[in-house]
Image (spheres, rainbow, N blue to C red):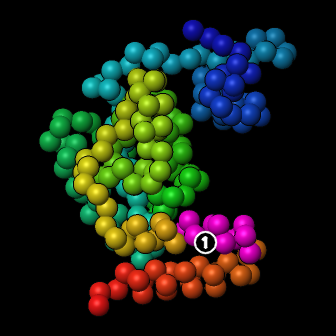
């Protein structure tokens, strides 16, 4: 089934210019008909996740935890092998689950050839709105599989909370004062959380 590029852009919630760049760069398949019409070939929505291309996505929130990327990858490779998945690639990225602009993760979500994304915990994909990602992928016959459903640790939550507070402080107080405000709030939170 084919559709016009403008319709494709609307359906996928992107601007026409972004969809045109994807077409130009070969990220979406289509053909040009005449001088001004581009028809996009929609992928079949009946692709079976059992035979889908599997990609492992590992993520840590800061460069300090970079060593954990390799151990995460090893655990997920072993998990996929036990399930009989053929892993085509392992993607490693540094970025908080609160950050919605992680290029490697966004590329995986946008790539229709990736049928299954395997992550260790939900917060490796996103801290908020995981269900939206899961539903959207399922709509296109794709899936995101979470290995460990257990809740995450206090350190990760504190890091994400710091990122959220910093983001709001930048909006409220401007760039210069945001760092000081964030540090003050984190100190207060840590003092309240300290045993004693």
Disc 1 crowd rating (10 Å Cα; few below 14, some 14-19, many 20+) is many
Residue highlighted by disc 1? 166
| Quadrant of res 178 | bottom right
Would you say residue 76 is visible in this rendering?
no
Q: Residue at x 49, y 62 (%)?
A: 95
- Main secondary structure type of the part rendered in magenta: helix
Image coordinates of residue 111 in percent, x first then y, are: 51, 35
The residue furthest left is 82
Describe residue 29's horizontal placement relative to residue 71 as left or right.
Answer: right
Magenta stretch: give its range: 163-173
Name which residue lies at 69% across and 25% down. 10
The correct choice, above or below, for 34 with respect to 137 in the image is above
Q: Up-down: is 161 above or below 130?
A: below
Query: Observer-nearest residue: 6 or 77?
Result: 6
Residue for point 43% across, 44% down: 130
Of 88 and 175, the residue lying toward us: 175
Magenta segment includes 171: yes
Residue 46 position within the rendered picture, expressed as x and y whole percent measured from the top left: 40, 15
């Amino acid at each position: 089934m084919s559709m016009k590029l403008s319709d494709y852009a609307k359906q996928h919630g992107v601007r026409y210019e972004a969809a045109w760049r994807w077409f130009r760069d070969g990220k979406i398949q289509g053909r040009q008909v005449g001088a001004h019409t581009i028809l996009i070939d929609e992928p079949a929505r009946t692709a079976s996740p059992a035979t889908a291309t599997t990609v492992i996505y590992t993520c840590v929130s800061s460069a300090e935890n970079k060593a954990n990327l390799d151990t995460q990858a090893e655990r997920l490779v072993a998990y996929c092998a036990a399930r009989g998945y053929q892993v085509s690639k392992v993607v490693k990225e540094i970025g908080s689950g609160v950050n919605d602009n992680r290029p490697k993760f966004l590329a995986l979500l946008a790539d229709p050839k990736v049928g299954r994304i395997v992550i260790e915990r939900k917060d490796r994909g996103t801290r908020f709105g995981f269900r939206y990602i899961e539903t959207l992928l399922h709509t296109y016959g794709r899936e995101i599989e979470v290995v460990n459903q257990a809740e995450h640790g206090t350190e990760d939550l504190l890091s994400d909370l710091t990122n959220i507070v910093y983001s709001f402080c930048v909006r409220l107080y401007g760039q210069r004062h945001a760092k000081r405000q964030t540090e003050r709030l984190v100190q207060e939170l840590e003092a309240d959380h300290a045993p004693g």
